[in-house]
Image: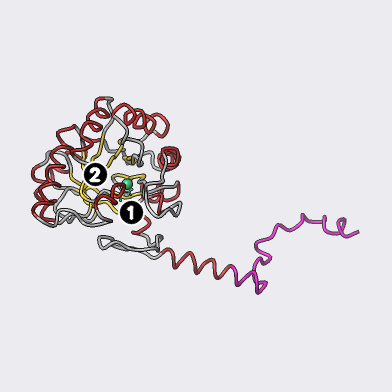
Amino acid sequence: KKKPMIHDFYKMKKEGHKIAWLTAYDFPTAQFAEAAGMDMILVGDSLGMCVYGYPGTVPVTMDQCIIHCEAVRRAAPNTFVVGDMPFGSYQIGDEHAVQNAIRFLKEADVDAVKLEGGERVASRIKAIVEAGIIVIGHIGLTPQSSGQLGGHKAQGRTSESAQIVIEDALAVEKAGAQMILVEAVPPEVTAFISKKLTIPVLSIGAGASCDGQLLIVSDLVGQFTAFTPKFVKKYANVAEIITQAMRNYVEDVKDKKFPTDEHCYNMLKGETEKFNE
Ligand code: KIV
Ligand code: NA
């Protein structure tokens, strides 16, 4: 498998081939994603919840994001890897945002960075793009500013709110972003945006009428158990499988059924007698 480049995704949009995108935070999971034929991997700041157990994404730091990007890059050298800019890494100013975007490329060799917001981050997007870095926009429900949105709520469900989402999409493209993610927005609005924009439009909880889909791996495999958003399709229940495996191990230890001979390193031939002298 050859690593796709940004122009491959433009071609896919043109030809109507859908882009498959998934988050991953660690080496084994990223290996599985590449083996499964994933087009893109997002090292999302959702790692705050999925890996570290924070209540949200706000506490996540640049250093955490970089460390997880490095692991994912090592595991998936032939997949388009996107680093997610955490809260505080691009809010302060254009220059600070460029510095942090550069860290993602220099330290973790990602292919692109993603940041949340439309109109209000246009100058950040422009500055990072001018530094030669591929930027992916993220509009609709933006978890880092969910407080302002009144919680983790779908956006664009009234025509007034839809207008804001559409204007954000246009602002992100105009600023130079080369792809855009739309989160928790009605399919009608996403369809309109997909037609209007030249850049590929990806959806998480924003319907099928766009150029690709994103899911959080911990939701997809059934590893994150705190809650499941409406837009998730659960393809497996690894929480159950792993817990059952661990339960079986506890039982075996308590019942003295593990280890058995087959798990032991026996002494070499003839050595046992000497040892027992
Ligand atoms: O961090 C992440 O995984 C994301 C998705 C929820 C869109 O940004
Ligand atoms: Na994120």
Q: Between disc 1 and disc 2, whose residue precedes?
A: 2
Name the side, left or right, on which 257 lies relative to 79.
Answer: right
Q: Is residue 21 found inside the magenta-colored segment of the image?
A: no
Q: Amino acid at mark 1?
A: Ile
* Numbered label attached to residue 80: none
Q: Residue at x 22, y 55 (%)?
A: 184
Disc nearest the viewer among 1 and 2: 2
Residue stretch rendered in magenta on the structure: 250-277
- Residue 90 x %, y %: 32, 35
Q: Residue at x 14, y 57 (%)?
A: 157
Q: Looking at the figure, which quarter contains the C terminus?
A: bottom right
What residue did someone put label 2 on? 138
**Camera-side residue of 88 and 197:** 88
Q: Is label 2's Cβ within 8 Å of ligand 1?
A: yes
Q: Kindly give the residue lying farthest to the bottom in the view shown.
A: 255
119 up-or-down from 141: above or below = above
What residue did someone put label 1 on? 216
Q: Amino acid at mark 2?
A: His
Graded by Cα atoms within 10 Å as few (under 14), some (14 to 19) or many (20 or more), the crowding at tag 1 reads many
**Camera-side residue of 92 and 271:** 92
